[in-house]
Amino acid sequence: MPVLAIDVGGTSTRAAIVSTDGTCVGSARARAGNPTSSGADDAAAAIAEAALAAMAGAAVDPGDVAAGVVAIAGASGQVGAWLVTELARAGLPEQLTLEADLLAAFCSGSLAPAGYALIAGTGAAAIRVRNGRIEATADGLGWLLGDAGSGFWIGRRAVLAATRDLDDRGPPTALTDLLVAELGLIRSSGRGTDGRVPVLRQLVAVLYGLRPVELSRFAPLVFDAAAAGDDVATGIVGSAGDALAATLTAVLVPDIAGPIVLSGSIVSRQPAVAQRAVRSVLTAAEGVEVITVSDGLAGAAVLALRQVGVTVDDSILVRLHGSLPPPVADQA
Amino acid sequence: MPVLAIDVGGTSTRAAIVSTDGTCVGSARARAGNPTSSGADDAAAAIAEAALAAMAGAAVDPGDVAAGVVAIAGASGQVGAWLVTELARAGLPEQLTLEADLLAAFCSGSLAPAGYALIAGTGAAAIRVRNGRIEATADGLGWLLGDAGSGFWIGRRAVLAATRDLDDRGPPTALTDLLVAELGLIRSSGRGTDGRVPVLRQLVAVLYGLRPVELSRFAPLVFDAAAAGDDVATGIVGSAGDALAATLTAVLVPDIAGPIVLSGSIVSRQPAVAQRAVRSVLTAAEGVEVITVSDGLAGAAVLALRQVGVTVDDSILVRLHGSLPPPVADQA
């Protein structure tokens, strides 16, 4: 009997039906389903939609699913119990369990019983894994209190740099024109009654209309500007790498050397950030394996297969990565 | 005929009836009345409440008021016109005009036609004044995009320092215990399933339940910890001073030496921050006058008196400060 794997991300929810040899036989995606950012009912609906579509694609009934794992941020305690109840009500298998998205990301990259994962997409966190479970977590505290080095963190710094440029508190930067263009605004001449340039007032109005986490959409502007040689953007990229290095360092212990799994768009698609984030670790210990994965869907499948007694080996993991659909480009 | 002066702050709204010699003959206060943070109708109601109570205290009818000035953040354009209409509907004098709170703060401290004001309370901004009007503004962009060095900015750094301490990403700091105690939480032993200390999860739950600007309530913890010698807190205080120095520097021009008016709790009651904020200016030019005021109520009265043709001189300004009620301790 196959298993169900679900990865709930900040931008989309992905579900897959996986046979016991690691072959994906059906998959689907839906909108983001995080209860914290999307609201509880909407999150359950998004997760159920993706899961039911994946089952339909594989011609599998809920009763045919041997086990299911939902990889989701902050999965534990009361939120978890509540969500499982909601999902059962939506027609999903009752054997569904929730696992931390951070653990699923680790299992996407490594079958080792111990090691580390550093995840940086819309949010950012690091974990230490021992005996297949999370032993320590650093950051992952959300946009207001942490997520240092995340897409939100980088995107907010792009906006701060542009506004500092526009009111002469900071140096000129290419980020200003990139941000103005990204929002469809125009830099006109003249000054308002308060002496401000008009586009600054427009920026403020537009940006306060977004949910704060949506500032992560401006992170790509920083990478573009840094690639073109902009000093301010290069500084932000370096700071993000340093912040992620501090997060990873906080969970390191001497008796676990690695591997280190990197997941999420910021560390999986931005080598400059990834290298800076793991630099101190690689300097301290030779031969540490660094593995990059796009997300936690394969890891959710690994965890579900283990639940039904499958000894997941490298060939199964390779088959998972080969048969699961790739995440879309914008997925964190 | 007397004039009406209203200062709309982040924590309260104050109103005063002032005779043409600068004597306050009635005053009142109400809750915060900023349309952006409190909502438009609620803001108009708070402003009207304070104004009507001040008129009642002075036994003055709306028809007896020669002019009125409302000092409020971001006063200009459409928001201004709308608010004046709402206030007239609530029974306030029709001659009411809105002025930027930043200009009112300047006029609270100086009758000079040109100079600078640096305001740091819940928010933070600087202006350059020429010919009695604002010629340039820096920052004042709100909690998400700016207000560098403000009470929010400092309070958020207190929270970030405590959470970094609790998950080992940053150094130990006295701010952690101060924050935990301020919120009535307790640091218990043990670890959650994600390896986190329990109080960190509680902190996250409590702090995300606040409106972001409410983080400004933790700024006093930083000043307390810095006074007791905590390195992390001392660093935050220094950074706030540097950020405010950059904001002030952004509006400086060679042909206006000063004066510099400091207003708002962060620069009026924290000498370490204030000195650091103006240090570079005082180094660059000798004999620049630095004046500290608590808020913009006296300045609103100055602007209202000028509207009715009164030549406001030092004796009137002294009388204003002597007869206006002092702001409450927590007012930004």
Image (cartoon, coloured by chain):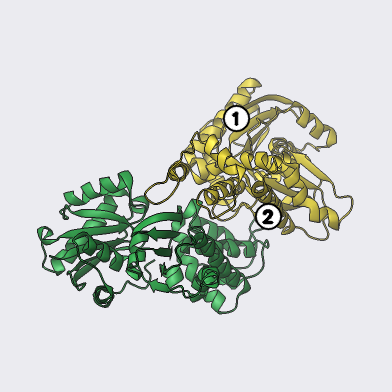
Chain colours: A yellow, B green
Residue drawn 21% across and 69% down?
Answer: B27
For the residue pair B280 and B159, the one nearer the viewer reads as B280
Q: Position of residue A179 (x, y in %)?
A: 55, 40
Res A71 visible: no
Corner quadrant of residue B120: bottom left
For the residue pair B148 and A12, the one nearer the viewer reads as B148
Left/right placement of residue A217 relative to residue B323 reads right
- Residue beneath label 2, please? A243
Kind of residue sitting beneath label 1: Ala
Same chain letter for marks 1 and 2: yes
Residue drawn 58% across and 71% down?
Answer: B233
For the residue pair A192 and A104, the one nearer the viewer reads as A192
The chain letter under disc 2 is A
The quarter of the image holding the C terminus of chain B is bottom left
Q: How many marks?
A: 2
- Residue beneath label 1, please? A51
Question: Separation of disc 1 and disc 2 at Cα?
Answer: 35 Å
Q: Position of residue A204 (x, y in %)?
A: 45, 45
N-term mark: 1 or 2: 1
Mark 2 closeness class: few <14, some 14–19, many ≥20 residues within 10 Å: many
Left/right placement of residue B158 relative to residue A255 reads left
Q: Position of residue A211 (x, y in %)?
A: 48, 43
